[in-house]
Image (tube, grey):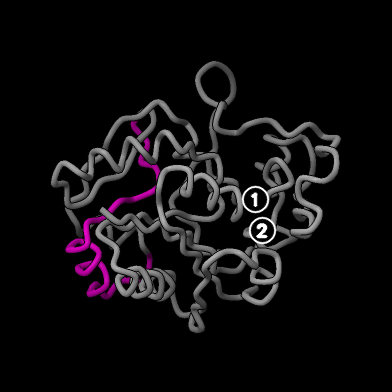
């Protein structure tokens, strides 16, 4: 079973000072690189969909397979379909859709979801404490149906499909870092760019001491959550 993860990173980060795909997550990795690593560890091929800041994202991630959504301004679904087209062409049996501003996902979570998809599911998505999360997993047939939908926002279109929700213990499936206040609350600093590729892994970790967002949940403060951002 070939699984292709589509990381949605085409929109405009109106609330952030930098493109979300380029923002520092952990270990000198950007949001996009962190997610690519997570999906790769789970055995997925990885495909990023870029748009507004395509050139900058390509320069920062020379080893990633990226496709450009030239009409990204039209709607979120335009970019989703660009990714689906590429995944179908690559021979995907299962497609995983995931927003770039949700980098706290665990590889073990992805593996668990893929195992469930192997049991003849059409579409499923995780949930944490009753809240719907990401990624959304689609069989090839379900992905083809999604490509034929005419809506503009992915979350709204998914409501027209039969998607099974799977309760999981990974809060990372709902943690959406889509604004500077959320980033600062989680990491203790304002959003900053990840270092260029040649510097990754060669220097010290950020002095702010980034914590693992995937470990957030349970006792304490609320976890920021949202549908896939169209920014």
Residue extending farthest to the top is 219
Quarter of the image containing the C terminus? bottom right
- Give above or below for 22 relative to 77: above
Residue extending farthest to the left is 120
> Which residue lies under the disc numbered 1?
179
Name the residue at 64% across, 50% down: 179
Name the residue at 79% across, 55% down: 195
- The answer to whether mark 2 and mark 1 are in CB contact below 8 A is yes
> Which residue lies under the disc numbered 2?
15
The answer to which of marks 2 and 1 sits earlier in the sequence is 2
Instruction: From the viewer's side, name the closer residue of 95 and 202.
Output: 202
In the picture, residue 14 is in which quadrant?
A: bottom right
Question: 18 left or right of 100?
Answer: right
What residue span does the magenta drawing correspond to?
Answer: 130-153
Name the residue at 25% across, 59% down: 93
Categorize mark 2 by other alpha carbons within 10 Å: few (<14), some (14-19), many (20+). Answer: few
Instruction: From the viewer's side, name the closer residue of 106 and 168.
Output: 106
**Spot occupied by residue 1 in the image (x, y as percentages of width and height):** 25, 53
């Amino acid at each position: 079973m070939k699984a292709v993860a589509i990381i949605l990173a085409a929109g405009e980060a109106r609330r952030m000072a930098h493109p979300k795909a380029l923002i520092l997550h952990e270990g000198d990795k950007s949001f996009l690189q962190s997610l690519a690593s997570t999906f790769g560890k789970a055995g997925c091929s990885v495909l990023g969909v870029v748009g507004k800041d395509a050139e900058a994202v390509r320069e920062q991630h020379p080893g990633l397979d990226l496709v450009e959504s030239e009409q990204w301004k039209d709607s979120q679904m335009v970019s989703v379909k660009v990714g689906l087209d590429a995944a179908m062409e690559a021979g995907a049996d299962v497609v995983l859709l995931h927003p770039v501003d949700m980098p706290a996902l665990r590889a073990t979570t992805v593996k668990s979801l893929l195992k469930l998809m192997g049991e003849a599911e059409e579409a499923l998505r995780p949930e944490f404490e009753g809240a719907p999360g990401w990624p959304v997993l689609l069989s090839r047939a379900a992905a083809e149906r999604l490509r034929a939908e005419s809506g503009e926002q992915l979350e709204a279109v998914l409501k027209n499909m039969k998607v099974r929700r799977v309760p999981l213990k990974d809060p990372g499936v709902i943690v959406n870092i889509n604004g500077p206040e959320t980033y600062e609350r989680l990491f203790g600093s304002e959003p900053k760019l990840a270092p260029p590729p040649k510097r990754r892994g060669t220097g010290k970790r950020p002095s702010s001491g980034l914590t693992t967002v995937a470990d957030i949940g349970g006792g304490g403060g609320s976890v920021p959550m949202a549908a896939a951002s169209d920014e």
